[in-house]
Image: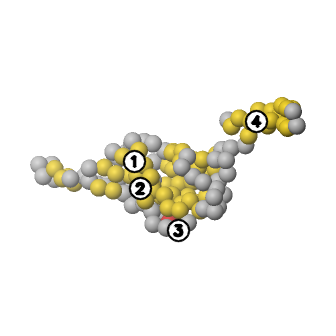
Amino acid sequence: LSDPLNGTTAATPTAPSAIAAADVYGSIVVTWTSTADDETSILLQRNTDGGAYADLVTLPPRTTSYTDSDVTVIGDPLYRYRVRTQNGAGNSAYSTLGTDAAISGVYPAVPDTLTAVPGTGSIVVGWAIK
């Protein structure tokens, strides 16, 4: 975008930095540092097991984390994430390959409030997930 009256051109936003991911109770929490002050949205992408990146979610400006609950342990997949900012002038670069967040072996939350109730010839076991 440009403003010919003032001789200025809007710039694309700067790329986020310090992207990281952590397994938190069966979900993956992805975090990053926002370095742009003129972003209008943030695009988070994910790939699984080295496949192509696909859009995961578009977030509002100034967002610095996202919880990805659509993950599985079946087959012990490797999840990789990258993030970029967007504004009216275009898109920033993605977080660099060296700072892509990757995590594998996402396991479900640890059971809590375990109960065992004796029955006739059996034991009924129950639990809750936090």
Q: How crowded is mark 3: few (under 14 residues within 10 Å), some or many (20 or more)?
A: few
Mark 4 vs mark 1, foreground winner is 4
Residue 89 at x, y percent in the picture: 26, 53
> Along the line of sight, which residue is nearer the eye, 108 or 64?
108
Residue 63 versus residue 92 in the image, above or below: above
Whether residue 1 is visible to the viewer of this picture, yes or no, is yes
Residue 125 at x, y percent in the picture: 79, 37
Based on the displayed image, in which of its 4 quarters is residue 116 positioned? top right
Q: Mark 4 points at which residue?
A: 126
Dot 1 amino acid type: Thr
Residue 111 at x, y percent in the picture: 74, 40
Residue 52 at x, y percent in the picture: 45, 66
Residue 62 versus residue 119 in the image, above or below: below
> Along the line of sight, which residue is nearer the eye, 79 or 87?
79
The first of marks 3 and 1 along the sequence is 3
The first of marks 4 and 2 along the sequence is 2
Dot 4 amino acid type: Gly
Q: Residues within 10 Å of mark 1 (few under 14, many from 20)?
A: some
Quarter of the figure with the C terminus: top right
Dot 3 amino acid type: Gly
